[in-house]
Amino acid sequence: MKLQSNIPFDFNKVKELILKSENICIVTHRNPDGDAIGSSLGLYHVLLNMNKKVKVIVPNEYPEYLQWLPSNEKVFNYSTQKDEVKKIFESANLLISLDFNELKRTEKFSEQLENISAKKILIDHHPYPQDIFDVKISDISVSSTAELLYETIIQCGFEKYLSKNAAICLFTGLLTDTISFSVNCSNPRTFEIASKLLAFGLNKEYIHKKVFDNYSESRIKLLGYALSKKMVIIPEYNTGYIWLTIDEQKQFDFKIGDSEGFVNYPLSIKGVNFSALFMQRDDHIKISFRSRGIIPVNEIIKTHFTGGGHKNAAGGEEYKLNIAETVKKFVSILPQYADVLKQD
């Protein structure tokens, strides 16, 4: 079976594995975003309606603005529930991996996943999926994993198991990965799927407010500080970046998810085609890249740091250098990409 991307997928195998599995485990990547959590909980509700025993596991905590989603309280956090998660892995017949292309993206339990006896399904929209899964539904042309998951549900004949709760979660995945339908959504099919999800009686304004207009006062003040004090524009390379130390984050009572979207702000400046965000963590520097047009930030981050992603949106880490050294390294590589950075 093929989707609009014309890639052949074995949806029959996905259907077969789901139907014959009783205990199903859903996992997603470290630092889960809206697409990761929305897809995971969306599939959770579908499988629950099929009378499956299903568990959702995340490697670590995710932002508060996603913790309102239906059945959020059912999610297992490996960081705080290691023993429970180990038992879930041991009893699982089927592992469904969502929104990541390599097991190392789960970081804390990647080795356990590699050695798990359960069959493995991947549903994801990132390039270069690892060749360890029994079935791969991988398509970089779609807007989000939520969109690809919806297509998978339909192609498997599981549409009757969709519900309002599942639709809320999947729509949230679509909404967040497209940044409220502003990027990665030129294909009309994305809006067709959004329409079908809304038809379950969703309140789009309510969901949007929960995700995008539900920040703390300290988060807004941190954004103001980042833009006024820590944003640097390099006009000769059409590049902008923001960097924040741990001490600066602590000044504004930083919580997981507070820097979400910061990397996009330099791109709103006329002439900026490449944007970066550097956030100091206890043992590494978290890096986010965004770009316009032909600038392949996934290749740039993969070449010079540890990470990957999409052509215009990628993320990664730096473990050896401190934050000042990481920023210096970033600036030093820009001349290598001068031709693509100076596009109109």
Image (spheres, helix red, strand yellow):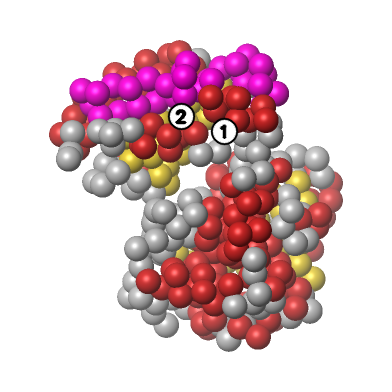
Q: What kind of residue is marked 2?
A: Leu
Viewed as shown, does residue 74 lie left or right of 11?
right
Q: What is the secondary structure assignment of the residue under circle 1?
A: loop
Q: Quadrant of residue 240?
A: top left
Q: For residue 242, say whether it is visible.
A: yes
What residue is disc 1 on? 259
Q: Residue at x 71, y 69 (%)?
A: 165
Q: Mark 2 points at which residue?
A: 277
Label 1: how many Cα within 10 Å (few below 14, some 14–19, many 20+): some
Task: Describe the element under mark 2 as helix, strand or loop.
Answer: strand
Please say if 24 is above or below 15.
above
Q: What residue type is labelled 1?
A: Ser
Is residue 142 depicted above or below 224 in this figure? below
Residue drawn at the location 34% of the way across and 71% of the way down? 5
User: Mark on residue 186?
Assistant: none
Q: Nearer the viewer, residue 81 or 182?
A: 182
Q: Is residue 89 visible?
A: no
- Quadrant (top left/top right/bottom left/bottom right) for the N terminus: bottom left
Of 36 and 273, nearer the camera is 273
Q: Indicate the position of residue 29 as horizontal and vertical percent values.
A: 59, 48
Q: Quadrant of the C terminus?
A: top left
Q: Nearer the viewer, residue 262 or 58?
A: 262
Which residue range is magenta in the image? 225-254
Decide if residue 133 is on the left or right side of residue 187: right
Q: Position of residue 51 (x, y in %)?
A: 79, 79
Which residue is found at the position 53% from the left and 57% from the top? 175
Judge from the rendering whether residue 255 lies leftward or rightward of residue 150; answer left or right.
right
Q: Is residue 331 left or right of residue 109?
A: left
Q: Are circles 2 and 1 on residues that touch, CB within 8 Å?
A: yes
Q: Quadrant of residue 284?
A: top right
